Image (tube, helix red, strand yellow):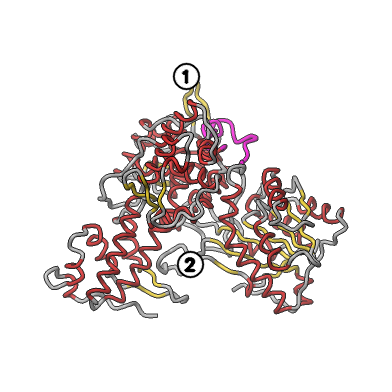
Amino acid sequence: MPPHAAASDSATDPATDPLRAALADDAFALRLLPILRQPTGTSSAGRPYLRRRAWETFRDRIPHLFLFGLSTLVAVERIEAAVEATAPEDGENVLAACRVARQIARTAAITAPPNLWLLRHVLTFFDELGLLRRLAKGDAIYPDDCVVELDGVATPLVAEELEADLGFLLSLGIVEQYDASYRIAGHRRVRRLLEGVSGLPPRPEVDPTALWRRLFSGEALTPPEQELLLEHALPAPKRLGASQNHWVPTLEEVELGYRLVPVVLGLRAAERTEGLTRDTELRARDLSEESSLCAAGALELLTAAGWTERWGERYRVTVLGERGFARGPGPFGIIQTYHPYMAQGREILLHGRGDVWVTRGENVGASQDANRRTFERANAELDRFCEDTGFTYSVFIEHAVGRGEATRQRFERDGEEGIRYFGADLEDAAIDAAVREQEAGRLPANMRFVRGADIGEPQVLIDALEAAGVEPEGAVMLVGNGFHEVRDQRDERMVAVFEGYRRAGIVLLFTEENALSIDDLRATAWNTYHAGFRYVHEKSGQALRPADPRPAPRLGPPLRAAWSECARRAGYVRAAAYCSRTRRIHPYTPKRGSNPSISVSHFFVPAELAARLGVTDDPA
């Protein structure tokens, strides 16, 4: 569809522009308005988007993290009200652009903090090894031949681990790539960031997330534990100036994101985030009578992030906080489970990752939040597939089970009659959480659990099914972001994994975050948290893949074979009509025409079964 009409010349003259006059007392809104007056476009799905010039101007020149994200949302509301009151000639275009600006700020509230949490860790262990000083001097760092001096001894770093760290910094605009080496990016904000890291407070030896959870759950903390939380929360870092010409984060934004993530996850783990909608009032003693001073520190940190506002002794949830509390814990929790890798980042660079592993104990609920809507879509598509094709099943499996959210939804739809339910996971913490859900009556009583089930070893699950007297052929397996956890992610290995499930006759429904190139990540900035998502999976030996084949990237390594390609090679048929996608990452249509989705829910049917049902492979 054609773009909305551009503003007329009179709309740029303050003396004759009623919209500017209505916003005369709001400097931030006036700064935003010229961008929102640039022509917008409309996607094939009927959603407005900013064209490239407008998006890049917004991305680089309008601060929209934390308090400035709140300023953006408030300014958008004021602009919308002014449009309604003054009815300018370009009002339709401005309102369409306001929708996009609101979504960008709301997205950044969710995506920026986990990326910043990771960045703080990486910069800290780079500083400990002297790498930041070398970058700040302009030295080139070659991952394949990087040696640091420790106690007078020249010590080589593990090339693969250093490559992953530098790739993450590259995706956030901190370094630039020069063939086989990396150097500091040229912007002065990058230099200030690198030079300021050594002055940040030291990372606590204890993960604050667990302490915040205990605090908000009403447990008593020891004086040293309370002191640690107060040091973590206060003084809350704040970025003061709004001037910028690059989206690279400031030192204060990095530190604020690093401190915010554990507080939010502590609230979620204590089940205190539900119902925190706009204007909900919070008081420190309501969050913790035992340690109200620490709770007040947490509220001050949330206020610095723009999630709450202080009103005397009370705090009120803002429009930004409403979005953050509702949607933040999922992505925050997914990233924070990799804390063991970050806590040992220095040692991993020196000696490799060894036996380091993710821990989901505090974040099983947050992972459930992240996957809930994905499972709703997948379960709905499964019902539609059965209705359209006549397919029936009597075995439902949830792998990477977490708390069993996919099964809970399936149980609500179908009950227990005629269906055997199974939950599988490698981690005992996940199975234990699902067992508690079953004991509470939220999962079917006949659900059986398979412990120690590596999703990359299909035979473990298949043996468990057969031992339970269940034939796996025709079973349905639903997986939320689990296949990327397969270790040794060579393309051939992933094909073999799918082949194991296909030979057993299992229908696969799985969602995976789309592997994005570094080119995409830099172009979209805070419009996705995939810079961090990609990084933690590279560090842990896991891997992301694109949903479908993608062009070769300009920056970074080539992408792996697509999920669709691996599954097809294993003998699966892609039932495209029952696949679904989330939003696209670019808020405009790139020239190259490739605008990948954040994630894709895949629906694959074994070829033999697909032939009987009349399902044909559709690459669309």
Q: Which numbered circle lies on residue 152?
A: 1
In this view, the residue in front, 79 or 491, is 79
- Percent from the top left, x then y, of residue 247? 34, 52
First reached walking from the N terminus: tag 1 or tag 2 = 1
For label 2, the SS is: loop
Magenta segment includes 345: yes
562, above or below 268, in the image = below
Image coordinates of residue 345 in percent, x first then y, are 52, 35
Q: How far apart are marks 1 and 2 (CA)?
A: 50 Å
Magenta region: which residues?
Answer: 340-359
Queried whether the magenta region covers residue 203, the answer comes back as no
Residue ID for mark 2 = 594
- Residue type beneath disc 2: Ser
Is 419 drawn above or below residue 213 in the view shown? below
Rendered image quadrant of residue 47: bottom left
Amino acid marked by disc 1? Gly
| Residue 500 vs residue 183, the one in the foreground | 500
Q: Where is residue 456 in the image (x, y as percent from the top left)?
A: 71, 51
